[in-house]
C-alpha cells in the first residue's frame, strides 16, 4: 500500500500562536488612552468646603487655588500667598481662557476670599467660582 504524502511534509508544523500583532495592538491602545486622558490637577491641600444647595459640576480644565483654614493661599501644593495669585492666573489664562475655582475652607474670612477673588479677576480670569460640597 502506498503511503500518502501531505502537502505540509516539507514544512515544520507549529503549535504556537503568533502574538506579535496582539502585542502591537495593545501598545497602540495604551498610547491612545494615555494621549486622550485628561488629568485633573489638585491643589495639594485638604480643604473643608462649605455646603451649598445650588452646587454644580464645573469644567475639569480649570485653575484650582486653595485657601486653607490657616489662611494660606496654595496653588499646586505650594504656598503662593495673595500676591502670587495674580501672576499665576495671568500666566495660565494667557495660554487658554479657563475658569478659576477657589477651594476655600469654610472657616476662612470673607475678606481673604474677596482679596483672592479680586486678584483672579484683575489677572484676567473671566470666571471665578467657589468650590462647595454639594
Image (cartoon, rainbow, N blue to C red):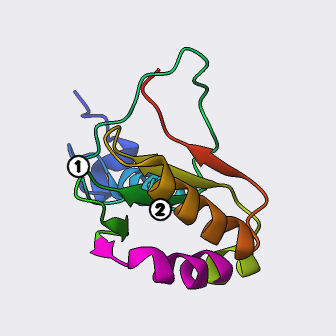
Classify residue 88 as left or right of residue 27.
right
* Residue placed most toward the observer, 37 or 6: 37
The quarter holding residue 58 reads top right
x and y percentages locating residue 12 in the rendered image:
24, 56
Q: How many marks?
A: 2
The quarter holding residue 122 reads bottom right
Mark 2 or 1: the one toward you: 2
Against 96, residue 34 (above or below) is: above
* Magenta segment: 78-90
> Which quarter shows the N terminus?
top left
> Can residue 28 be seen in the rendering of this structure?
no
* Residue placed most toward the observer, 20 or 95: 95
Classify residue 71 as left or right of residue 7.
left
Q: Which mark is residue 31?
A: 2
Helix, strand or loop for disc 1: loop
The quarter holding residue 23 reads bottom left
> Can residue 103 be seen in the rendering of this structure?
yes
- Mark 1 Cα shell of 10 Å, populated few (<14), some (14-19), many (≥20): few
Give the labeled residue for mark 1. 14
Mark 2–mark 1 distance (CA, rounded to whole Å)? 32 Å
x and y percentages locating residue 70 in the rendered image:
22, 58
Q: Is residue 36 magenta?
A: no
Disc 2 and disc 1 in contact, CB within 8 angstroms: no
Q: Which mark is residue 88?
A: none
x and y percentages locating residue 65 in the rendered image:
46, 60
* Magenta stretch: dominant secondary structure: helix
* Residue placed most toward the observer, 44 or 79: 79
Classify residue 78 as left or right of residue 61.
left
Amino acid at each position: 500500500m502506498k503511503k500518502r504524502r501531505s502537502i505540509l511534509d516539507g514544512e515544520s508544523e507549529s503549535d504556537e500562536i503568533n502574538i506579535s500583532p496582539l502585542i502591537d495592538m495593545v501598545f497602540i491602545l495604551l498610547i491612545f488612552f494615555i494621549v486622550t486622558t485628561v488629568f485633573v490637577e489638585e491643589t495639594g491641600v485638604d480643604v473643608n468646603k462649605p455646603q451649598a444647595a445650588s452646587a454644580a459640576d464645573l469644567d475639569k480644565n480649570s485653575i484650582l487655588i486653595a485657601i486653607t483654614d490657616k489662611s494660606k493661599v496654595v496653588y499646586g501644593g505650594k504656598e503662593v500667598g495673595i500676591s502670587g495669585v495674580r501672576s499665576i492666573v495671568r500666566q495660565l489664562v494667557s495660554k487658554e481662557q479657563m475658569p478659576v475655582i477657589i477651594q476655600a475652607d469654610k472657616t476662612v474670612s470673607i475678606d481673604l476670599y474677596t482679596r483672592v477673588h479680586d486678584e483672579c479677576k484683575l489677572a484676567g480670569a473671566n470666571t471665578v467660582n467657589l468650590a462647595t460640597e454639594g
